[in-house]
Image: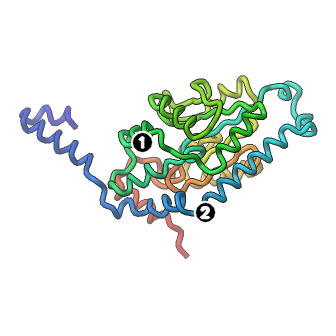
Amino acid sequence: MQRILSRRLPATVLLAAISLSNALAQTPVPAADLDYQVAAVLFMQKSAEYRALTYQAFNIARLRLNEDFEKKNLKKLPKGERKRPRAIVVDIDETVLDNSPSQARSIMTGRPYNQEDWYAWGEMRKAKTVPGAVDFLNYAVSKGVKVFYISNRDEVQKAATIDNLFKAGFCDVFSENVMLRQKESSKDARRAAVAEKYRIVMLIGDNLDDFSGVFERKPIADRFAATDASRGEWGRKFIVLPNAMYGTWENAIYQYQRLTEAQKAEKRAAALELP
């Protein structure tokens, strides 16, 4: 926009236009366009059912981990795999750390997700834990399992993220096993790097992209099909945490387009299945 205007307008007019553009970018979104988030955030913050679901997920994870240590199950593995050190790969946001206060602030201020607010929230180091996460991951570490935190937080957030994880009670959290986004959003390469040295016994996340690249940027029907094709892994190698606030499930509704909040609201309404 600035390059186009600079060819046609005097400098004073150009500066005024740019200032107006920046001001509009900071204008709060009408509350109605973010109202759909209220129930989602309240579900995460106030519903005992949400807590039950997260405890259920980590209870199942503990059962599966214990099964992996049983001799009868180890014998089923190829010989070369039996002696490889175990690893668990987990996402961070809405998997082990709860960012619902940040989401709630977005609703109250009328400012949808933006990098400035997200970075500021991370720097506070105030995210609490998802119920059950600390007990399970520290239990896994006590069994000699290496935990890798693979997240699409940006690399510049690494120090604050490590501090927050330690503050929340997670042990064995260091720079080498907190693997944040550097160049690409896909986590496949980072998971592959872990798999070069470890046997990944479990992946835990709130988003299908936390488990495999086969789910990435796919239409809703294809995401359903890929989920069905992996039905034997859910609750076994793949442990899913609930997240009603955001995720690629929502991006799929928007067909991965960059839309205004009003346009997103139209897409959500159009996606509803009626009798």
Q: Earlier in the sequence, mark 2 or mark 1?
A: 2
In x, y percent, where is residue 38? Answer: 44, 62
Q: Is residue 161 left or right of residue 85?
A: left
Three-letter code, disc 1: Trp
- Report which residue position mark 1 lands on: 121
Gap in angstroms between the C-alphas marked 2 and 1: 25 Å
Q: Residue at x 66, y 59 (%)?
A: 52
Q: Residue at x 69, y 44 (%)?
A: 135
Residue 253 in sight here: yes
- Residue 105 vs residue 82, the one in the foreground: 105
- Report which residue position mark 2 lands on: 48
- Does 11 sit above or below residue 67? above
Element assignment for label 2:
helix
Label 2, residues with CA under 10 Å away: few <14, some 14-19, many ≥20: few
Q: Residue at x 72, y 48 (%)?
A: 230
Q: Based on the displayed image, in which of its 4 quarters is residue 68 positioned?
A: top right
Label 1, residues with CA under 10 Å away: few <14, some 14-19, many ≥20: some
Residue 213 in sight here: no
Q: Based on the displayed image, in which of its 4 quarters is residue 18 positioned?
A: top left
In x, y percent, where is residue 263? Answer: 36, 57
Q: Residue at x 54, y 52 (%)?
A: 249
Q: Is residue 42 left or right of residue 211?
A: left
